Amino acid sequence: MPPPEHNKVLGIAASDREDAARIDEIAAKRGWFRPEENSPFYPIIQDYLAEKLTLDEATNKLCTPIDEKINAQRLDDVNFLDLWYSFLHSARRINFRERNWLTVLVDLVKSFKAHSVPGNEKYNYLYSSLTDFGMASREAHNDAPEPGRATHVEITTWANLNAFWALITGEEVFDLSLYAIWAMRDALEEDHPDDRDSTAAQKYDAYVPAAAVWATGAFRLLFEKEQDLTPTDDKQGNPARGGWLWKGKAEFSKERWYFWRERFAMVAERKDVTEETRIVAKDAIAAMERAATFEKI
C-alpha cells in the first residue's frame, strides 16, 4: 500500500510549476535529506547559481563564518551536514542534461575544498577533506526512487543527484566511485522481472537514468579504474558485489565495464521502457565508447 503522502506527491508532480519548485515540495513530502529551514548555506549556493555571486564571493560567504567558529574554538557549532545537504539539494534541482550548471556547482565545492583558514592553517584539513560530505551523501543516497511509485520528477531528480556525484568523482574532488557500482547494479545487473509492486519496464525506467549519468559524467575514471573490492574478511560487508546477472568479482574491471555497456544496449532496444530511458541508455553507450577511444589516443 502506498504511503499516505503518495497521492499528494502525484499531484505535485503533475502540476505545471517549474521543476525546481516541484522538487522542493516533493522533497518535503517524502522526507528527503535536505537543508534546514533556516540554513545559512543554502541561500548562498542558490544566489551563486543564480549568478548573483561570483565564485570567490560565494566561497567567502560560505567559509568566513566557519573560519570564525574555528578560530573561536567553536567547531562543534559548524553544521557541516547542513552545508552538504544544501549542495546536494541544489544538485537535485539542476537537470542532469544541464551539465554546465552542475559543473558550476562542482566548481564551488572545489573552491571550498581549496580554502585555507587565515592564520590557522592547521585546520585546513576541515576543508580539504570535505568534512562530512561522505556522510551526507550516504544519507541522501537513501532517497532513491521506488519503481512503480516514483514519479517522473523523482526519477529525474535522482539522476540529477547522481550526475553531481559522478562529476565530483570524475574530477577527483571526492571518491564516490562505489556509488557508480550501486547505480549500475540496480539498473543493469538484475533481471528485473514483473512483480506485484512494479513491472520490469518500471524498474528500468527508475534505475537506468541514474546509472547512465555515471557513464556520461565519470566515464574516463571509471573505464580506467581496475580494483578488486572483494572483502578480505568474512565479517565485512560486500558493497561492490554484483547483481544476479554479474558473475564476476566485486570489482572495477574492463569486463564489468563492457558488461554494463551490453546491458545499456539491451535497454536501448526495449520497447516497453520510456523514450527517455532509451535515450539516456544510448547516451551512456556513446560515452562508454568515447572512454575506449580516449585510452587509445
Image (cartoon, helix red, strand yellow):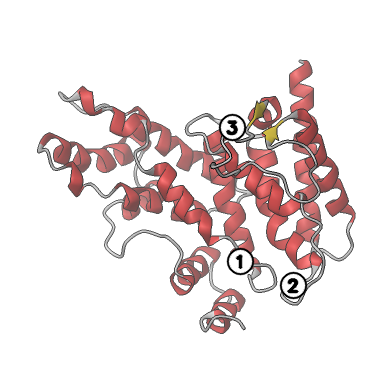
Seen from the viewer's position, the closer of residues 184 and 63 is 184
Q: Is residue 153 visible?
A: yes
Q: Which mark is residue 193?
A: none
Amino acid at circle 1: Val
Mark 3–mark 2 CB contact (< 8 Å): no
Crowd class of label 3 (few under 14; some 14 to 19; many from 20; radius 10 Å):
few
For image coordinates 17% across by 25% down, the residue present is 120
Q: Which mark is residue 198?
A: 2
Question: How many numbered markers are drawn?
Answer: 3
Q: Which residue matches tag 1?
A: 153
156 sits left or right of 55 in the view: right
Crowd class of label 1 (few under 14; some 14 to 19; many from 20; radius 10 Å):
many
Q: Which residue matches tag 3?
A: 232
Instruction: Quadrant for residue 107, please give it.
Output: top left
User: Label 3 vs label 2: CA separation?
Assistant: 36 Å
User: Label 1 vs label 2: CA separation?
Assistant: 17 Å
Q: Which label's residue is closer to the chain start, 3 or 1?
A: 1
Q: Which label's residue is closer to the chain start, 3 or 2?
A: 2
108 sits left or right of 60 in the view: right
Question: In the rendering, at what x and y percent does residue 20 appear?
Answer: 50, 63
